[in-house]
Amino acid sequence: MELESLGAYLKSRRDRVTPVDVGLRTYGTARRVPGLRREELAQLAGVSAGYYTRLEQGQAGTASQQVLDALAQVLRLDRDERAHLHNLARHPAAPRLVRPRPEKPHPRVLALLGSIGDTTPAVVLGRRGDVLDWNRTGHALVAEHVDFDAPRDPARRPSIPRLFFLDPLTRDLFGNWDVLARAHVAYLRFTAGRYPDDARLAELIGELTMRSAEFAKLWAKGEVADCTVGTMAFRHPTVGALSVDYQVWLQPESPDHRLEVYTPNDAASGDALRLLAGQAAGNGDGDGEENGNGPGVRQPSDGRVLSR
């Protein structure tokens, strides 16, 4: 699957802006496009219609920052969408896909994870949403049915997007699944703009598009977001309902790797996390420690671990 081109993104954003949004009068005439016409966008952005058409068709070469900023202003792009637009403009329309080497979390990220301990749930995610590491409470919170040691093997690393869209146990875990699903798709598109030549990312998006109608529908919307903070409502099978905020910490040396930390939103959720931490610590002792699965940990219904 080819990742998104600059032209495709411009068209999707042009389709969502109506003439009324930008103060144009249509005089009641019938329109064949849902949003702005190419010539209308070009006029509002101060470029020729011919140039914009070539830009959308991938035939105009590299667009200047001034042109991109003018288009972004007319299209009402937010900060993340503007960054995505500039990312797409820096790459050729059809880059040659390459298969990157397995990701390795930076030692500082792992040191920060270790300093958190097991009282606060935390997960280290790679650029494609693979779990690179987690503490025991993070594992118990977001994927207790997955082997705790799976992140250590690049071939078995759990993929959060795959779990989210293809694993029924993960879907049942979240009370606000619809909101989080949009965030996952928006972040994958943001990442695709930064790394349009990533073959593994292209394969992931292609697989999810083919296997999940919900993912395909959300992907077609073209939403973009960096997704560094948010709220998760859990229906946890071990400790019941709880609400947490997630926040992402980045390391300058490894901006692709995200340390995601979860904190409770209320006293009841704090109690639930403390109970989960205690149980996770107990599951890490004794016979369950070798494979990361302690007493009472569920397995996927088909016995598989959804991983890379």
Image (spheres, helix red, strand yellow):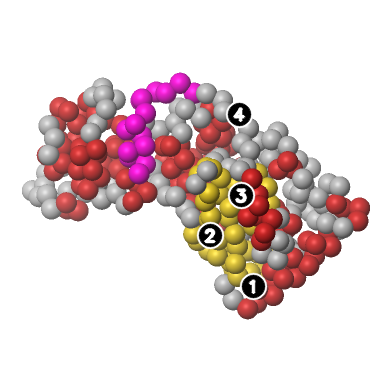
Task: Tell me which residue sits at (53%, 34%) in the image.
Answer: 201
Q: Which one is nearer the viewer's eye here, 37 or 136?
A: 136
Question: Which residue is identified by label 3?
Answer: 109
Location of residue 52 with respect to 137 vertically, above or below: above
Q: Secondary structure at mark 3?
A: helix
Q: Which mark is residue 101?
A: 4
- Circle 2 Cα neighbour tier, 10 Å, few/some/many (<14 / 14–19 / ≥20): some
Q: In this rendering, would 162 be left or right of 26?
A: right
Contact between marks 1 and 2 (CB within 8 A): the answer is no
Q: CA distance from mark 1 to mark 3?
A: 26 Å
N-term-proximal mark, 4 vs 2: 4
Residue under numbered circle 1 = 269
55 over 235 or under it: above or below = above
Could you say where residue 123 lies in the image, as x and y percent from the top left?
Answer: 64, 53
Which stretch did the figure color magenta?
A: 83-97
Is disc 3 surrounded by few (<14), some (14 to 19) or many (20+) residues within 10 Å? many
Quadrant housing residue 150: top right
Q: Is residue 165 visible?
A: no
Label 4: state its secondary structure: loop
Q: Is residue 24 above or below residue 174?
A: above
Residues marked 4 and 2 touching at CB (< 8 Å): no
Q: CA distance from mark 2 to mark 3?
A: 15 Å
Q: Residues within 10 Å of mark 1 (few under 14, many from 20)?
A: many
Amino acid type of the residue tagged 3 in the rendering:
Val
Left or right of residue 86: residue 294: right
Contact? badges 2 and 3 (CB < 8 Å): no
**Of the residues under marks 2 and 3, which one precedes in the sequence?**
3
Find out whether residue 86 is within the magenta segment: yes
Residue under label 2? 247
Residue plotted at (70% across, 66% down): 119
276 with respect to 45 (left or right): right
